Amino acid sequence: MTITTITHSIPGSSGYLDIYPERKVSVFKNPYIIGLTAVASIGGLLFGYDTGVISGALLYIKDDFEAVRHSNFLQETIVSMALAGAIVGAAAGGWINDAYGRKKATVIADVIFTLGAIVMAAAPDPYVLILGRFFVGLGVGIASVTAPVYIAELSPSEIRGALVSTNVLMITGGQFLSYLINLAFTQVPGTWRWMLGVSGVPAVVQFFLMLLLPESPRWLFIKNREEEAITVLAKIYDFARLEDEVNLLTTQSERDHQRGDNIRYRDVFKSKEIRLAFLAGAGLQAFQQFTGINTVMYYSPTIVQMAGFHSNELALLLSLIVAGMNAAGTVLGIYLIDHAGRRKLALFSLGGVIASLIILALSFLNQSSGSGLYGWLAVLGLVLYIGFFAPGMGTVPWTVNSEVYPEEYRGTCGGMSATVNWISNLIVAQSFLSVAAAVGTGPTFLIIAIIAVLAFVFVLVYVPETKGLTFDEVELLWKQRAWPNNPEYAQNLLHNANHS
């Protein structure tokens, strides 16, 4: 069999869809896919809500607890303890996903998150609040691994980017919702308790909805539960493509069993192509954080106050605008990620981020001039930053990490990559206020701009384009990068490019 025949025969590949255009799946013509994606993406909503809500709640926690008001360290710990929990949750989440499935992992995350929300709302002192933040972080960490993988494994390759990016939209939507909730409760007794406590509601909703949803068909095939997997796939594809998809999954399952079922963390990096995939995936996750996104989201009310707007309510309102831009930008990203492609979108995004960070830095460096113009310039810089970041670096890292790893390592590698994200997130959250106090807010944003330049170079060198590729084609891409002198891999990739 020739290589051309092989690539044409891969369901969902560009060559396959050129031959059988009627088998192409459209998002809006399949309500089943929309329903699965919407429910799974509630995990993203939890992620985003927790990221956004603490920034507004912190303004009122400082009013209730004097110790917090007088300690930058306690403020940073309240924010970052959820990140510490997320690091543990993401690391464990990869193993939970591969051992027990995507569905059970999601349900476990919901239970832990709800427990954390209750503890936070009832916290009598900052230290119990910090404990609740840790539990919430555990749930968010597991969900951050699970939702993108679950959605990706249920998605046809031609719309995978858009569907996985829907989870990112829910993250940004959760952040936007958190600012609305923060504004709604500004005049209510127990302000911050309501802000943090209501976060348990979506987790409860997802818990019960997930009980009605199926497991990932790819995970079911790995566990030799083919009949259940076929039942799920039959609701996604027409009969002709279903037959091809099932044949492909059967072949992959047999191949994976030949490799061995006992997958451990220590086995992952024996393969050069997996090392390259993890470098690209984990690098994107790290740069997503070190280019400042959660600095902006966690501390946007505080940044707005630094810019000269001292009212808590006004700071929250301006932060709501930033969160709205984040959500709107993600909607744009959902469209572009399967049209412009992952790599090009990330590069365009980082170019705008660099320019926006320079505007932020200049506005704070000139703050001492006393002109109100620079305060508004800082707000403009924040809005532009989000407008450029959200469509690209907001969506691309999670999408790429859901598709670049081999099936038998997807949960494990995804968990480790998400752990890199959360560790990077923790470093930024724990250090931003202290660094800003030490060197100034303007120089801090200049440092982040330099990191964004490094991120741009990293994407150019290490991140390939995966738009429209099947999981098998992505594996082939990494093999070609790992072994560039192998003519078989090169010929196959050239054929795919000619049909993109």
Image (tube, rainbow, N blue to C red):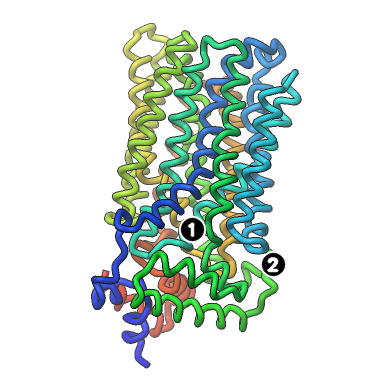
Q: From this view, report whether residue 307 is shown above or below residue 467.
A: above
Q: Earlier in the sequence, mark 2 or mark 1?
A: 2
Residue 376 found in image quarter? top left
Pick the front one: 81 or 289: 81
Pick the front one: 148 or 490: 148
Q: From this view, report whether residue 282 is shown above or below residue 23.
A: above
Amino acid type, residue under disc 1 in the picture: Ser
Q: Which mark is residue 233?
A: none
Residue 455: x %, y % from top left: 44, 47
Residue 242: x %, y % from top left: 39, 74
**Crowding at mark 2 (Cα within 10 Å: few <14, some 14-19, many 20+):** few
Which residue occupies 63% across, 63% down? Answer: 98
Which residue, given by chain and number where applicable, does mark 2 sit on? 264
Q: CA distance from mark 2 to mark 1?
A: 19 Å
Which residue occupies 46% across, 51% down? Answer: 397
Dot 2 falls on a residue whose secondary structure is loop
Q: Which mark is residue 402?
A: 1
Placement of the C terminus among the 4 image quadrants? bottom left
- In the displayed structure image, the side of residue 6 where residue 311 appears, left or right: right
Residue 226: x %, y % from top left: 55, 75
Which residue occupies 33% across, 42% down? Answer: 331
Residue 356 found in image quarter? top left
**Crowding at mark 1 (Cα within 10 Å: few <14, some 14-19, many 20+):** many
Residue 317: x %, y % from top left: 41, 17
Amino acid type, residue under disc 2 in the picture: Arg
Residue 245 found in image quarter? bottom left
